[in-house]
């Protein structure tokens, strides 16, 4: 799974827009001396990664057609309730940052959004995705709360703010950083349709995709994850009761993750380890630290850690998890996990957790937090929740069970690639069998 990325240069070829003087972005010219309508060979247009002469690869954990996502919730009408908004921001940012300073951060987000007439939930979601809510973060990708820096912009570009606003010390002021980010969001909102039409981009849904890539969008993953964070904030702010929907297993369930719909990135039966084993559930894209919830009322059957080889899974108490983080080499592919038994012979499983807070034998309610998302047991991919379902002891397809909350993985690039790779392996294996049979026949003759 790809990590969220943030841009290196905002670049747009002014000549390609219908009117190069109608907006700030139209004058963000090609950097590194390009004068013939192309960017210099050492810079990838719109990309905030290591400069390369090769085009970037599109993130595979995203929908081939982003139209498969339903419409995003609209902005909150009227005045924002300060107490509820601040509590929502503190709660979500508390998953990835120290609690100290988060109430002040929430207040600043709320006040800057009011000043700039920007959606406060979008600003907070961007802070969560870019800097993990750390105003003092200085990294290779940027400075401050929204990870912005001067080198994102070509020299001489017309910006929606004075270039002096991009000085390091100013960007370390969270309020100033947010104002700069709000100006960029407003710019992209006004111009992204014309920009996409003029220079082409990977299919995406909203202007926020340009915040991560610049003028040419190369992938929808950062946008998807930002919009998910925004949905989570809106849910917490609204304090809605646990929602239940019917499932194919005759059991009303709720989502194991907040901010649905979520993206399923790998489904049941997909090859693992080069075809040596099959995937036993559905992977759902998620961020380390997110709460994982029981999908229905039930009793915890197991809470512990998957072990390598033929060793049985080892039951643990929640307080023992921390020391086991240092024993990753002993874990099997499931990592820390929890299983819950529900009515009707249904059992749900939650794998790759970073932590869990329940014990075997404990009764849990639907929507109750049982753990947090992690990467335990994972070899290569990024953080996600692996979710399994059994009915009367038989493994079922959880993508169908969760269809009300999770977009099926067969709509992703991941699925397309995995299907092609499996087809190729099967053809190679068939060729090898035919060759072996022919060789055996020759020896007999």
Image (spheres, rainbow, N blue to C red):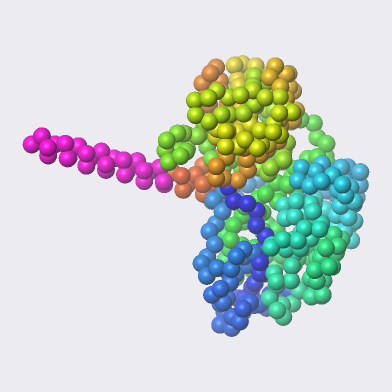
Residue located 58% across and 47% down the image: 1
Residue 77: within the magenta?
no
Q: Nearer the viewer, residue 61 or 439?
A: 439
Residue 435: within the magenta?
yes
> What's the magenta region?
420-445
The C terminus, quarter of image: top left
Q: Is residue 418 left or right of residue 148?
A: left
Tell me residue 132's x, y (percent): 75, 51
Residue 294 appears in which quarter of the rendering?
top right
Tell me residue 242's x, y (percent): 76, 30
Q: Is residue 32 above or below residue 191?
A: below
Q: Is residue 238 left or right of residue 216?
A: right
Residue located 31% across and 40% down the image: 429
Most common secondary structure along the magenta stretch: helix
Tell me residue 339's x, y (percent): 63, 24
Residue located 46% across and 34% down the image: 278
């Amino acid at each position: 799974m790809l990590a969220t990325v943030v841009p290196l240069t905002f670049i747009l070829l002014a000549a390609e827009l219908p009117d190069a003087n109608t907006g700030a972005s139209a004058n963000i010219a090609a950097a590194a001396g390009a004068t013939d309508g192309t960017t210099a060979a050492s810079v990838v247009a719109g990309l905030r990664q290591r400069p390369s002469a090769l085009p970037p690869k599109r993130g595979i954990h995203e929908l081939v057609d982003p139209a498969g996502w339903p419409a995003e919730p609209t902005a909150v009408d009227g005045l924002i309730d300060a107490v509820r908004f601040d509590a929502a921001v503190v709660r979500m940012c508390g998953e990835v940052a120290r609690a100290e300073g988060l109430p002040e951060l929430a207040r600043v987000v709320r006040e800057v959004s009011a000043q700039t007439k920007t959606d406060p939930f979008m600003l907070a979601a961007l802070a969560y995705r870019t800097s993990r809510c750390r105003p003092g973060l200085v990294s290779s990708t940027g400075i401050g709360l929204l990870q912005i820096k001067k080198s994102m912009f070509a020299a001489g570009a017309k910006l929606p703010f004075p270039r002096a606003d991009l000085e390091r010390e100013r960007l370390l002021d969270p309020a100033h950083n947010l104002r700069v980010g709000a100006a960029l969001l407003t710019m992209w909102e006004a111009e992204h349709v014309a920009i996409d039409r003029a220079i082409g981009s990977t299919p995406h849904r909203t202007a926020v995709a340009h915040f991560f890539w610049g003028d040419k969008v190369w992938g929808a993953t950062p946008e998807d994850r930002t919009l998910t964070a925004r949905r989570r904030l809106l849910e917490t702010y609204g304090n809605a009761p646990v929602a239940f929907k019917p499932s194919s297993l005759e059991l009303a369930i709720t989502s194991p993750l907040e901010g649905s719909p979520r993206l399923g990135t790998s489904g049941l039966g997909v090859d693992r380890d080069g075809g040596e084993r099959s995937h036993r559930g559905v992977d759902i894209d998620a961020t380390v630290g997110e709460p994982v919830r029981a999908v229905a009322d039930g009793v915890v059957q197991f809470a512990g850690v998957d072990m390598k080889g033929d060793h049985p899974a080892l039951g643990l108490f929640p307080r023992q998890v921390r020391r086991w983080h240092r024993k990753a080499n002993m874990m099997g592919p499931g990592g820390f996990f929890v299983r819950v038994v529900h009515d009707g012979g249904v059992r749900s499983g939650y794998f790759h957790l970073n932590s869990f807070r329940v014990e075997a034998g404990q009764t849990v309610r639907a929507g109750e937090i049982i753990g947090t998302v992690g990467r335990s047991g994972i070899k290569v991919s990024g953080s996600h929740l692996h979710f399994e379902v059994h009915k009367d002891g038989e493994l079922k397809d959880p993508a169908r069970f969760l269809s009300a909350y999770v977009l099926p993985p067969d709509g992703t690039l991941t699925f397309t690639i995995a299907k092609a790779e499996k087809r190729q392996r099967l053809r190679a294996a068939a060729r090898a069998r035919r060759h072996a049979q022919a060789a055996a026949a020759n020896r007999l003759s």
